[in-house]
Amino acid sequence: MSAAIHSLPAAAHGKPLIFIVDDEPVSAEIVAELLQLEGYRTRVFHDSRLAAAALSDSPVKPDVLLADFKMPGLNGLQLLARGKAEICGLKTILMSGLASDSALAEKDFSPDQWVTKPFPVTTLLKSVRTALAGGN
């Protein structure tokens, strides 16, 4: 894996950019719309491998990487870990209907925030704001 990129996050150029990765298109689009209503820019991926490639190749890096846990290809934790390794300062949020505190604690990597599906809109927004503020 390459060394982390030291590029300016999207927020340095305006509104924060959030990459949303979920293999369930309806879920991803709903999350994107909710975040856009709050003033965030979003980019949606339904394939974790395409999202991983975009983390490396995109000239504008996301401020937050929000990923579902259970996906084909890379699971959410693998994708978030790869994103952190690629982009210095990237904030990560894991969404899952399966993950729990104990399951996350057993992994080599822990996201900055996590939300359990189904989640209230306020929980999602609070997680994004907390991640952007640098909190855990």
Image: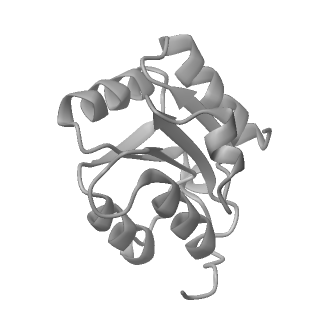
Considering depth in this image, is 77 or 136 the residue closer to the camera? 77
Q: Is residue 106 left or right of residue 30?
A: right
Give how far across and how far down residue 109 sits, in percent.
66, 59
Q: Write the residue at 39% across / 21% down.
A: 34
Q: Is residue 25 left or right of residue 109?
A: left
Give how far across and how far down residue 14 sits, in percent.
55, 46
Q: Look at the image and tell me whether residue 15 can be seen.
A: no
Which image quarter: residue 107? bottom right
Figure quadrant of the C terminus: top right
Considering depth in this image, is 13 or 88 the residue closer to the camera? 88
Q: Write the residue at 23% across / 49% down.
A: 46
User: Please, which residue is most extreme toward the right here?
Assistant: 135
Position of 52 relative to 91 (above/below):
below
Q: How is the image coloured?
A: one colour
Give how far across and how far down residue 104 sits, in percent.
64, 45
Position of 4 relative to 31 (above/below):
below
Q: Look at the image and tell me whether residue 115 can be seen.
A: yes
Q: Write the residue at 38% across / 68% down.
A: 52
Which image quarter: residue 42? top left
Q: Write the residue at 53% across / 69% down.
A: 82
Q: Is residue 47 left or right of residue 131?
A: left
Figure quadrant of the N terminus: bottom right
User: Please, which residue is most extreme toward the bottom here?
Assistant: 2
